[in-house]
Amino acid sequence: MVKGVSRRVVVVRPQKGDMFEQAIFIVRDGPSEGRSAEDILREACSIAAESGRRGRVRLLPAAISAAAGAASVGIAWLLSAIVF
């Protein structure tokens, strides 16, 4: 347990979507000075909305990379078996 530390947080709860219940942002002490609470909340909401639009992970490039890696290891093993 940490004592004597105070942090400011912004909690954003999405209105739609079933994957996430809330996003929690920890506000920095220095750069947030002089900004209004509305500015901080607006930036947190835009970051949360942006992260939802990044898209899904594409499995095809990962599968191609895995197949290429397996093929290169297989070729290296085959060449070492022939040479030695």
Image (spheres, rainbow, N blue to C red):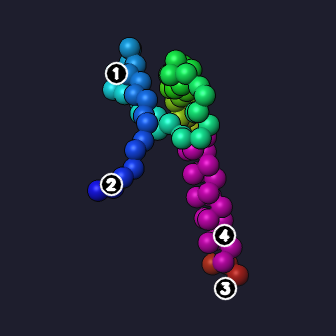
How many neighbours does mark 1 have within 10 angstroms: few (below 14), some (14-19), or many (20 or more)? few
The kind of secondary structure element at disc 3 is loop
Q: Position of residue 47 (x, y in %)?
A: 55, 27
Which three-letter amino acid code belongs to the residue tagged 3? Phe
The mark found on residue 83 in the picture is: none
- Residue at horizontal 32 percent and vertical 54 percent from the top: 3
Which three-letter amino acid code belongs to the residue tagged 1? Asp
Look at mark 1 in the image and give the residue it sits on: 18
Dot placed on the residue nearer the N-terminal end, 2 or 1: 2
- Tell me, yes or no, whether the two marked residues, 2 and 3, touch with CB atoms within 8 Å: no
Q: Position of residue 71 (x, y in %)?
A: 62, 58
Q: Nearer the viewer, mark 4 or mark 1?
A: 1
Query: Could you tell me which quadrant the N terminus lies in?
Result: bottom left
Specify whether residue 17 is in view: yes
Look at mark 2 in the image and give the residue it sits on: 3
Q: Nearer the viewer, mark 2 or mark 1?
A: 2
- Residue at horizontal 58 percent and vertical 33 percent from the top: 32
- In the figure, residue 11 lies in which quadrant? top left
- Residue at horizontal 58 percent and vertical 58 percent from the top: 70
* Alpha carbon distance from label 3 to label 4: 12 Å
**Above or below, comparing residue 57 to residue 68 in the picture:** above
Specify whether residue 55 is in view: no
* Alpha carbon distance from label 4 to label 1: 46 Å
Dot placed on the residue nearer the N-terminal end, 3 or 1: 1
Look at mark 4 in the image and give the residue it sits on: 76
